[in-house]
Image: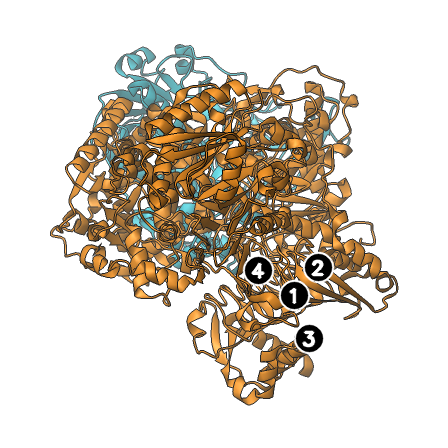
């Protein structure tokens, strides 16, 4: 550690955001770039802890103190090596990760944590700028073929790892573009799609084959796949949205968040939409669900020119500071304000939706009620309606962002006859192999819906499992580990 | 059949090789050589008066051994032989007499006598006959009686009538060696109980397992008036163990030894290989009969005696031989003449020093003398009378001599020799004696013509160059991590020092680690504790030497110019350039050969084994071919070719050549990419390497420089230089930890213990090293090499090519396992903050680590099923919590808030907190208004004695003497000036801004008898407090603990290697000491074997974290438990490991006011922790069926290895030594159940307290006049304690109690005397005068009637005013070594002193009106000394590291000086004081002022501040 007292003398400073008025006019990324000198200053706040809780907090096991130190010492190139050793796509996580590392940062006990995410993204952005990121095709091919089904972050990570280990990888994607949720789920103002494309191009240049518009199990038989490939990894996500058992769900104007977000991303990419537009302009929009997707809908709605946006959350409003049972370094269950929340809209907590109402098959209003959290004698949580608290909101657009219930149980999962867990996710062993030999699974289809950073971690672990399965030896690192041993 | 008089067999963790001894030694002689019975009587009197320096075991009547060596009493023997019915003895000098110990059984004795008689006949002697030595065993102890031998005298005469004098003596020596050999080999029952104390025509030894007063009563011969001698050499033993051993009593044939040889293992190995090349005209063919010169299994003293005897019999004079084996510190001595330096340098090529603290008295019957080791770490005082009597002993006052008869009083100085030539009838001075010896040969010329120096060699033709293209790969092959580059190498290259760390070590032993380990990590450094002191290699560097040599050693029994044809190196780390110089060395007498240390990677362990045996053969052949510099090289590692671990190769070749008796024919140089940290180098040297070229470490540094990782502010040429400097410094630190001063003695000394290698590997490649638990073999070693090798040469491509990140020093995922990790820390904090026991159980579940992997030894153990008892029948947690302590963390290392929170918590639960070594604010002694108490029950007494005054001592419930510290055993510490703020300075009695150094040793504990004395001192001041002694676990700690128990400690703490909050060099954190499981089990076993366990409370600490840990500790023998890290974690510590940087972000380990505000710890959280621990303990107790902790102590049979653990390395461990339960008599107590007998009732102070009643009760002035003698120890301490108890810190008004004594005072005269007591002693005093003086006044004056110059004679002993705080002291005579060491406030005047004056002083004033020794003012950070420098030689004797020399010019200081000299004159009547005062203007300019630089600065700051206060 170069600077022993950096954390005492330097204040936390994050990247500034573009002015709200300006950013609402476009879909460009929100943060302003920070200078190298500023990043170096922030890196100097890292205390090089004896126990770096951040390193534990990161699902990938990013060796945060090491790259902080290297950045502080202006050794960016080595910082990049350290970062890439654990994280295939820091350009993604550096933008969209909620940064559990920062929640676990020791400095966070009694001060503002280190801006780890900012350092991360600065390292990788600089690496691209400097031309340090070039295709690294393997020097040696094992001759083994691996199919990766699904091109989200888990699939991409698995593909990159396996390709570098010398296997021939084909990525199958049912959509027309590579990236899964990265391409269509995440709004551009959070991550510019060029960032994604640049990585996909790089992977292709390293020898990975991408096959889009190919829905394995539907238009590409599982039997064929099994015959052609030595191993298969399913990284097809958890795309089954959780339904809202509420009358009026079928009304026009009630949509799943993901449909809404996808449309906007396609528009930004210049696509011509074939289905009817879902647009928020001049409407009162209600978003059901207080999570990240809900917040993405909020920002997108505002950009589309919504009249008013209200976001409902079932759970009560979280506290502003950590309660006693939620101490550092656990993820804080406190009130989080995303950039979208800064931009406008209203958040309402402890609300349950009772019904959608309208006429002519069109949504006109929503009935909702206040709820309270209560515990029964077994300690189970229940939401109890508050008497006489029902109310009605006039709305033309409701976006359901209530989460996902698991992988889509279509041809692929069924055809393979995979064992599932109680939570309807795919069962895997510690090497990420499913109940079918040679078939692996990783990402949301195993974990349930989760973060990009977890998806990458899953993908890395599955790649390790596949490599072990194919070669009998362990060359690839597991997630959570600095470098393989 | 009585017990064997040897030691018990090796069992459990006990190994007889750990036995140590220390002692009282002395002699009496008539200078003129006139024999009398009176000399023997006087010798015995001396011995009796040294009795308090010895020890007794569980049987109070059995001593550790005593004996006497005298000239052969011809007249008496003639009479005795006649009475025994033997023929008329030949005339004096024509026959030899042996003292023989024989078995108790008549039958066995008879058989063995036959063996001896045959040898007598075969060696050309005539048996005159046997005489039973009459003894009276009615007064000796039970244990002594059980093993009492038959004692016979054997009379022999040579068949060759011409064989007389020294020639006869030589033949008798050969005869004794032959007898010893034959007895060893005869296989007869009882042979192990046959021993010859002496066989000589000049001397005879009477000794046994006796206490001094028992000697004349037991050996009836000694009372016979015909028993006459001109000299008597006597010895009283203090063994750190009590096993009855008649043979180990001293004197041996030539010496009596007080001290310890630390380098014994190496010395013995070198001797064993040397003896193959012996040749001697004097001994002729007999030379072959002398092997083994060192009798196997001998103690250090006996081994020394064996070799000394050989050198003398080989034709050297006794004093010459002593000088060879114990050379002075000559290397850095500017005052030593060239001839003497040449003598020592020459002999360095013949034999390495036998290093360690030692006072050795020696005699061959014609001369008698004594010498001290180079450090002077043992006391030796002498008196010469006007009527030709010489008395030399460990203490003064051992024989009453009227002052008028005294011609001279002196003391031995470090490295100096004192000799009486009885034949010439005169005392020969050190100077004359050595002059004669060092000019025997033109040594200087021989060296000039033969010795080659590395620095003079020519330029090599092909200096090797690095290859940055393959660097990474090679680093990977040798297991480098990025962390090592950053944490280890970078600081070394930039600062020239090894980096510091904090919070100890919480990683598994190498053998329990999941990560591939370097072989070095299976070794642990040994270190000195109690039985000998560590050295301070920085402030006492004048005794240290790193110079190394290679070449062919010549016949030890001869000397010639060729003997010094060796190549000398200043230090043992070679650059690539230097290595090439050596490789291409072209000088007569040197031939270099490089041997590759490689094996075929794919062949694994088999390949490794084959390569090792080939390497050994090649080395053997090369040596036989007269190659005398062998370079073992691992350059050229490839995918196919892996490197043999350098340590394994070195150990293998070293021991192979020893076995082939070739080892001294060549030197080994290691050229390896593997070694990089200091520990690696110390190991390679410890197993025989003369020098190491760490080429890869250096290449790595070059690369780091090129890349800008090493700042370019550092000059390029300094990178490697700094690195080497750091390694060198680190090596000296490791040597000094064990009390070893020179490279040469350390080389091959194997001062390590091994944990985790199997006995096959150890016996073959690291022969003789302690390795108690077995472990991995060559297979395991090869597997670990292969893991690194594969990382470097992967068989598939890898996504990234970089070094492992590491994780040894900081936690990393997939790095080394740390017991404190995010999971354990977070859960421990959550559960104790929330008071949630269920959550706490989750924490203990992880911490106990039972399920997945076992990373501690206790994790490998499981409980056996017991007979459960209901939980409510188990004693309550309140009882259990009383056994809990917090660790010794000083206020200074942790914040006031953290320190006081811990104290309050422990006082609330009835446990004990510990001050640590930084003293304690007296304000904390009083309870707070709410009933809370911030006082620490345990008050620590550490080497710096910060704040240790009478008031502190009387406010302790327990006083803990810290002998070593887990994180850095054998080392001192330092609180840099910038961290010493006003509060810390106040509590530590110093000035803000002045660096506070903790010396490595306690300067009043160089041996076990010294520890006994300190315990006695403290017990006198506070008889109610228990005294505990803190030891750190290492091989042999049980033996030391037994000694400590005999030194009357009430409690012993066995500390694991892993704890420690303090700053410490990383090498020490990682590589010194062992887990408490082994140390505790060993201690319990040895205490039980000695029946000492019942009188000791046994505590353990070191990463205790759960109730299960506590139960395991209890079953292994502990009954109290220390916790440090875990309670700190409950206070918010998150193991930043930055304690040493003062940047602790949670306010725990910092003094920064801003950061201290972050402290969020709560008393309740700490209490919750201890409650939860006790709850878990209680639950396990119920399961195991124990209702009380006492029942559970030492019930090791309730533990068994957990066979379910499938760790690939741990499976090879054998835990049975830990689980061993010695067979015991029923009365042996397993837990603390009886009090120690401290013998306080005999203290003179009891009388003083009665006589001073009026002063104590009514503060009336009282004057007391009494005689005093050397057995009156710690005089004034108990009285002082009484005053502190009644009157607090301020004591009584000055001069309330006047104590006037006449005589020779015992040790610790005036120790810890507070305000109100004024002691005056007319006579002289022993060591430790005014130790801890805290307000009183001490005057020691040369008696009226003395006919000698006080400025030329020794008045008081060593280590005066150690840790003194306040008060005054006046001595009109000369003091010994280390006057005013660690003085922090006393004003003192003295008329001369020995070496190391004012060492580590931080305050006070010292006036010296005479000569000083060397190294004055070393580590002196505060206070001022005024030295009268009449000869103008003072400057050369000052250590200018921290002080400047100035003139005395300021008005204030002139007045201060004058007033001190006036007082000195007033109190002592000093002649020189009078002269100075009368002629002030002449004398004043001759005074030199010694001014510490920091102190000057701090005083200026203080003045500025005061000025601001006054004007502001």
Of mark 4 and mark 2, the one earlier in the sequence is: 2
Of mark 3 and mark 4, the one earlier in the sequence is: 4
Of mark 1 and mark 2, the one earlier in the sequence is: 2
Tag 4 near tag 1, CB within 8 Å: no
Badge 3 is on which residue?
B1467
Image mark 4: chain: B
- Front position among marks 4 and 1: 1
Distance from the alpha carbon under mark 3 to that under mark 2 = 19 Å
Left or right of residue A272, residue B1466 in this image: right
Badge 2 is on which residue?
B1268
B565 and B40: which is toward the camera: B40
Query: What SS does tag 2 mark?
Result: strand
Badge 1 is on which residue?
B1323
Distance from the alpha carbon under mark 4 to that under mark 2 = 20 Å
Image mark 2: chain: B
- Residue at image x 77%, y 50%? B933
Residue B1221: x %, y % from top left:
59, 22
Q: Chain A: what color?
A: cyan
A6 and B1404: which is toward the camera: B1404
Around disc 4, counting alpha carbons within 10 Å, would you say few (fewer than 14), some (14 to 19), or many (20 or more)? Answer: many
Mark carried by residue B1359:
4
- Front position among marks 3 and 2: 2
Distance from the alpha carbon under mark 4 to that under mark 1 = 18 Å
The letter of the orange chain is B
Discs 4 and 1 carry the same chain letter: yes
Residue A28 in sight from this viewpoint? no
Discs 3 and 2 carry the same chain letter: yes
């Amino acid at each position: 550690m170069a600077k022993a007292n950096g954390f005492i003398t330097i204040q936390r400073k994050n990247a500034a955001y573009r002015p709200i008025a300006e950013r609402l006019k476009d879909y460009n990324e929100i943060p302003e770039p920070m200078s190298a000198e500023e990043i170096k200053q922030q890196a100097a706040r890292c205390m090089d802890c004896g126990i770096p809780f951040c390193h534990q907090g990161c699902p990938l096991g990013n060796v945060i103190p090491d790259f902080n130190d290297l950045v502080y010492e202006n050794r960016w190139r080595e910082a990049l090596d350290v970062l890439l050793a654990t994280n295939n796509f820091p350009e993604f996580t550096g933008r969209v990760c909620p940064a559990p590392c920062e929640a676990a940062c020791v400095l966070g006990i009694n001060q503002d944590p280190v801006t780890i995410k900012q350092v991360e993204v600065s390292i990788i952005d600089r690496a691209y700028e400097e031309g340090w990121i070039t295709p690294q095709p393997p020097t040696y091919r094992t001759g083994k073929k691996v199919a990766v089904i699904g091109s989200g972050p888990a699939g991409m990570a698995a593909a990159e790892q396996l390709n570098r280990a010398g296997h021939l990888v084909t990525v199958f994607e049912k959509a027309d573009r590579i990236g899964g949720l990265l391409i269509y789920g995440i709004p551009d103002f959070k991550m510019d799609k060029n960032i994604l494309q640049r990585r996909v191009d790089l992977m292709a240049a390293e020898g990975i084959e991408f096959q889009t518009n190919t829905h394995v199990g539907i238009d590409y038989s599982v039997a064929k796949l099994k015959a052609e490939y030595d191993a298969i990894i399913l990284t097809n996500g958890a795309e089954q949205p959780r339904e809202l058992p509420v009358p009026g769900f079928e009304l026009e104007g009630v949509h799943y968040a993901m449909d809404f977000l996808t449309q906007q991303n396609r528009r930004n990419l210049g696509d011509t939409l074939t289905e009817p537009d879902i647009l928020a302009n001049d409407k009162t929009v209600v978003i059901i669900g207080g999570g990240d997707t809900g917040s993405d809908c909020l920002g997108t709605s505002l950009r589309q020119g919504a009249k008013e946006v209200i976001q409902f959350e079932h759970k009560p409003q979280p506290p502003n500071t950590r309660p006693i049972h939620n101490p550092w370094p656990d993820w804080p269950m406190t009130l989080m304000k995303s950039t979208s929340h800064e931009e406008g809209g209203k958040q309402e907590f402890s609300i349950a939706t009772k019904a959608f109402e309208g006429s002519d098959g069109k949504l006109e209003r929503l009935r909702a009620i206040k709820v309270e959290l209560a515990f029964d004698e077994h300690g189970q949580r229940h939401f109890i309606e508050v008497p006489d608290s029902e109310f009605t909101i006039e709305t033309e657009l409701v976006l359901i962002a209530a989460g996902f219930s698991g992988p889509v149980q279509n041809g692929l999962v069924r055809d393979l006859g995979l064992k599932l867990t109680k939570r309807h996710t795919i069962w895997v062993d510690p090497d990420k192999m499913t109940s079918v030999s040679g078939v692996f699974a990783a990402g949301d289809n195993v974990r349930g819906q989760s973060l990009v950073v977890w998806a990458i971690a899953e993908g890395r672990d599955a790649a390790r499992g596949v490599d072990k399965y194919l070669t009998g030896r362990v060359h690839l690192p597991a997630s959570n580990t600095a470098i393989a041993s | 059949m009585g017990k064997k008089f040897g030691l018990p067999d090796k069992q459990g963790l006990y190994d007889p090789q750990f036995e140590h001894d220390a002692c009282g030694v002395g002699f009496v002689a008539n200078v003129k050589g006139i024999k009398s019975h009176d000399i023997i009587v006087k010798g015995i009197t001396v011995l009796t008066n040294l009795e308090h320096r010895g020890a007794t075991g569980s049987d109070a009547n059995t001593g550790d051994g005593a004996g006497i060596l005298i000239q052969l009493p011809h007249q008496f023997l003639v009479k005795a032989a006649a009475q025994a019915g033997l023929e008329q003895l030949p005339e004096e000098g024509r026959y030899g007499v042996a003292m023989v110990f024989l078995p108790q059984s008549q039958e066995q004795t008879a058989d063995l006598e036959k063996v001896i008689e045959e040898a007598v006949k075969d060696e050309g002697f005539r048996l005159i006959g046997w005489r039973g030595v009459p003894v009276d065993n009615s007064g000796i102890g039970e244990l002594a009686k059980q093993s009492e031998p038959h004692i016979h005298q054997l009379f022999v005469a040579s068949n060759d009538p011409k064989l007389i004098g020294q020639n006869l003596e030589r033949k008798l020596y050969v005869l004794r060696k032959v007898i010893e050999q034959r007895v060893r080999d005869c296989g007869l029952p009882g042979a192990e109980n046959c021993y010859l104390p002496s066989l000589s025509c000049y001397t005879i030894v009477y000794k046994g397992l006796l206490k001094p007063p028992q000697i004349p009563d037991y050996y009836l011969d000694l009372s016979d008036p015909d028993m006459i001698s001109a000299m008597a050499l006597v010895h009283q033993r203090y063994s750190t163990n009590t096993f009855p051993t008649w043979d180990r009593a001293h004197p041996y044939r030539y010496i009596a030894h007080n001290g310890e040889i630390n380098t014994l293992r190496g010395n013995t190995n070198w001797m064993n290989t040397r003896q193959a090349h012996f040749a001697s005209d004097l001994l002729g063919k007999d030379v072959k009969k002398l092997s083994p010169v060192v009798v196997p299994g001998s103690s250090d003293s006996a081994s020394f005696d064996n070799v000394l005897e050989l050198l003398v019999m080989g034709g050297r004079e006794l004093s010459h031989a002593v000088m060879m084996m114990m050379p002075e510190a000559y290397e850095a001595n500017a005052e030593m003449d060239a001839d003497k330096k040449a003598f020592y340098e020459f002999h360095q090529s013949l034999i390495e020093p036998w290093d360690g603290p030692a006072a050795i008295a020696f005699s061959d019957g014609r001369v008698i003398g004594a010498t001290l080791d180079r450090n002077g770490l043992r006391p030796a005082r002498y008196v010469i009378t006007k009527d030709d009597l010489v008395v030399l002993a460990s203490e003064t006052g051992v024989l009453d001599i009227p002052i008028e008869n005294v011609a001279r009083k002196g003391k031995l100085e470090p490295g100096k020799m004192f000799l009486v030539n009885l034949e010439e009838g005169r005392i020969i001075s050190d100077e004359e004696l050595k002059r004669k010896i060092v000019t025997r040969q033109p040594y200087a010329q021989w060296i000039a013509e033969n010795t080659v120096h590395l620095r003079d060699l020519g330029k090599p033709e092909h200096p090797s160059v690095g290859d940055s293209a393959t660097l990474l790969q090679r680093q990977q092959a040798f297991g480098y991590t990025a962390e090592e580059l950053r944490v280890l190498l970078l600081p070394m290259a930039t600062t020239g020092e090894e980096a510091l760390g904090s919070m100890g070590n919480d990683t598994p032993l190498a053998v329990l680690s999941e990560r591939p380990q370097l072989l070095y990590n299976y070794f642990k450094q040994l270190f000195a504790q109690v039985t000998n002191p560590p050295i301070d290699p920085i402030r006492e560097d004048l005794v240290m030497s790193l110079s190394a040599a290679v070449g062919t050693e010549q016949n030890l029994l001869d000397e010639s110019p060729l003997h010094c044809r060796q190549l000398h190196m200043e230090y043992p780390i070679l650059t690539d350039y230097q290595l090439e110089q050596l490789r291409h060395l072209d000088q007569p007498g040197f031939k270099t050969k490089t041997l590759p240390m490689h094996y075929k990677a794919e062949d694994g362990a088999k390949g490794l084994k084959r390569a090792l045996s080939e390497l050994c053969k090649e080395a053997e052949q090369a040596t036989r071919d007269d190659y005398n510099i062998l370079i073992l090289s691992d350059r050229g590692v490839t995918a196919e070719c892996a490197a043999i671990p350098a340590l394994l190769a070195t150990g293998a070749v070293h021991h192979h050549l020893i076995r082939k008796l070739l080892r001294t024919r060549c030197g080994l140089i290691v050229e390896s990419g593997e070694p990089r940290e200091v520990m690696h180098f110390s190991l390679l040297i410890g197993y025989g390497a003369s020098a190491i070229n760490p080429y890869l470490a250096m290449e790595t540094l070059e690369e780091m420089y090129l890349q800008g990782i090493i700042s370019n502010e550092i000059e390029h040429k300094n990178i490697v230089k700094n690195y080497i400097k750091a390694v060198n410094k680190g090596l000296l630190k490791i040597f000094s930890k064990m009390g070893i001063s020179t490279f040469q003695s350390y080389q091959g000394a194997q001062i390590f213990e091994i944990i985790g290698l199997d006995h096959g590997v150890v016996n073959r490649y690291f022969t003789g090293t302690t390795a108690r638990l077995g472990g991995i073999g060559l297979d395991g070693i090869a597997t670990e090499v292969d893991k690194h090798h594969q990382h470097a040469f992967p068989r598939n491509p890898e996504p990234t090519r970089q070094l492992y990140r590491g994780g040894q020093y900081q936690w990393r995922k997939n790095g080394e396992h740390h017991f404190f990790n995010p999971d354990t820390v977070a859960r421990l904090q959550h559960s104790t903050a929330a008071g949630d026991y269920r959550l706490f159980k989750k924490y203990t579940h992880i911490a106990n680590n039972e399920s997945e992997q076992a990373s501690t030894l206790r994790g490998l153990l499981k409980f056996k099923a017991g007979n459960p008892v209901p939980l409510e029948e188990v004693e309550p947690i309140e009882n259990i919590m009383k056994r809990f302590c917090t660790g010794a963390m000083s206020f200074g290392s942790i914040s006031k808030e953290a320190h006081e929170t811990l104290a309050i918590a422990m006082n609330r639960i009835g446990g004990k907190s510990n001050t640590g070594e930084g003293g304690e604010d007296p304000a904390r002694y009083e309870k707070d208004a709410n009933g809370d108490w911030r006082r620490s029950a345990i008050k620590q007494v550490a080497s710096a004695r910060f704040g240790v005054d009478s008031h502190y001592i009387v406010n302790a419930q327990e006083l803990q003497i810290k002998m070593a510290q887990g994180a850095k055993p054998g080392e001192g510490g330092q609180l840099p000036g910038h961290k010493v703020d006003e509060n810390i300075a106040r509590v530590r009695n110093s000035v803000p801004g002045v660096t506070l150094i903790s010396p490595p040793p306690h300067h009043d504990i160089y041996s076990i008898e010294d520890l006994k004395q300190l315990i006695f001192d403290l017990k006198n001041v506070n008889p109610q407090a228990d005294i505990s002694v803190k030891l750190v676990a290492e091989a042999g700690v049980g033996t030391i603990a037994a000694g400590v128990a005999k030194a009357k400690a009430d409690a012993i703490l066995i500390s694991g290697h892993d704890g420690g909050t303090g700053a410490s060099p990383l090498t020490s954190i990682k590589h010194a000491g062992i887990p408490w499981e082994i140390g505790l089990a060993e201690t319990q076993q040895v205490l039980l074997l000695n029946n000492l366990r019942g009188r000791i409370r046994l505590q353990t600490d070191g990463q205790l974290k759960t109730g299960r840990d506590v139960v395991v500790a209890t079953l292994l023998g502990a009954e109290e438990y220390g916790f440090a890290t875990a309670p700190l974690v409950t206070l918010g510590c998150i193991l930043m490991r930055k304690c040493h940087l003062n940047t602790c972000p949670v306010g725990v380990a910092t003094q920064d006011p801003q950061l201290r505000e972050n402290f969020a710890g709560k008393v309740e959280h700490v209490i919750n922790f201890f409650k939860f621990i006790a709850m878990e303990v209680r639950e396990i107790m119920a399961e195991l069926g124990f209702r009380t902790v006492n029942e559970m102590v030492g019930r090791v049979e309730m533990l068994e290895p957990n066979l379910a653990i499938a760790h690939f390395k741990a499976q090879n461990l054998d835990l049975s030594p830990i689980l061993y339960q010695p067979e015991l008599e029923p009365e042996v107590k397993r837990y603390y159940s009886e009090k120690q007998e401290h013998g306080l009732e005999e203290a003179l102070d009891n009388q003083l307290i009665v006589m001073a009643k009026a002063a104590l009760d009514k503060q009336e002035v009282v004057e007391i006049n009494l005689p005093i003698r050397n057995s009156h120890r710690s005089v004034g301490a108990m009285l002082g304690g009484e005053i502190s108890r009644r009157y607090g810190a301020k004591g009584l008004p000055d001069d309330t109690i006047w104590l006037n004594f006449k005589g020779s005072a015992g040790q610790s005269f005036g120790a810890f005397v507070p305000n109100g007591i004024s002691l005056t002693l007319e006579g002289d005093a022993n060591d430790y005068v005014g130790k801890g003086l805290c307000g009183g006044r001490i005057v020691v004056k040369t008696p009226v009637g003395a006919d000698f110059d006080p400025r030329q004679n020794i008045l008081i002993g060593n280590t005066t005013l150690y840790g003194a705080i306040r008060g005054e002291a006046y001595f009109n005579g000369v003091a010994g070594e280390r006057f005013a060491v660690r003085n922090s406030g006393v004003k003192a005047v003295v008329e001369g002193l020995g070496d190391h004056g004012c060492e580590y002083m931080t305050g006070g004033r010292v006036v010296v009106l005479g000569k000083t020794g060397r190294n004055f003012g070393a580590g002196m950070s505060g206070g001022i000394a005024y030295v009268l420098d009449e000869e103008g030689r003072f400057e050369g004797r000052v250590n200018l590291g921290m002080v400047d020399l100035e003139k005395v010019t300021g008005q204030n200081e002139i007045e201060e000086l004058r007033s001190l000299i006036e007082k000195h004159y007033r109190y002592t009547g000093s002649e020189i004081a009078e002269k100075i005062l009368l002629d002030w203007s002449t004398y004043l300019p001759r005074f030199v002022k010694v001014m510490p630089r920091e102190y000057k600065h701090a005083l200026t700051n203080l003045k500025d501040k005061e000025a601001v206060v006054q004007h502001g």
